[in-house]
Amino acid sequence: MNIANIGASGLAAYSLQMQAAALNIANMGTEGYVPATTKLETKSTGGVSATLFKAEDMGRLLEDNKPLAGARLEGDIVDLGRASIAYQANAALLRAEDRTVGSLIDQLA
């Protein structure tokens, strides 16, 4: 997997994580709303993938014998901030890769 694909997979994964956290925060007081969470996993070929789960699935999803985040305001706020920083880092990676490739093309021309 190349750098652009790794960065793009990070953008997609952290975008999904931000969406889940934002939905949970926005619907915190909504009766009947089922909170969502994401599970991030490293791909063997490089990059990261995200899977969206609803709260009823969370009991089956354990990380280090602890339930995954979600359905808690403080956890969702932390997840949102962490995902935003990771998203920005992946976007910076893609911009740097684009500048590097552009510079190499300029030198070859």
Image (cartoon, rainbow, N blue to C red):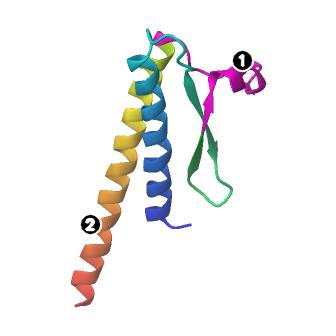
Viewer-nearest residue: 77 or 96? 77
Vertical position of residue 107 compared to residue 45: above or below = below
Across and down, in percent, residue 54 comes to 62, 27
* Quadrant in which residue 32 is drawn: top right
Residue 53 is covered by the magenta coloring? yes
The residue sitting at the bottom extreme is 109
The amino acid type, in three-letter code, at marker 1 is Lys
Marks 2, 1: nearer the viewer = 1
- Mark 2 vs mark 1, CA separation in Å: 41 Å
Q: Is residue 99 left or right of residue 46?
A: left
SS for dot 1: strand
Q: Where does the C terminus fall, quadrant-wise?
A: bottom left
Magenta stretch containing residue 19, yes or no?
A: no
Total numbered labels placed on residues in the image: 2
Position of 63 relative to 8 (above/below): above
Q: Amino acid at mark 2?
A: Arg
Q: Position of residue 101 (x, y in %)?
A: 32, 73
Q: Which residue is mark 1?
A: 66
Q: Which residues are magenta?
A: 52-73
Q: Secondary structure at mark 2?
A: helix
Q: Residue at x 43, y 17 (%)?
A: 27
The image position of residue 76, as x and y in percent, is 47, 19
Find residue 99 and name its label. 2
Q: Which of the 4 quarters of the picture holds residue 100? A: bottom left
Rendered residue at 57%/20% (across/down):
34
* Vertical position of residue 92 compared to residue 39: above or below: below
Seen from the viewer's position, the closer of residues 95 and 29 is 29
Rendered view: 62 above or below 30: below
Question: Neighbour class for label 1 at 10 Å: few (<14), some, many (≥20)?
Answer: few
Drawn side of residue 104 relative to residue 62, left or right: left
Could you tell me which quadrant the N terminus lies in?
bottom right
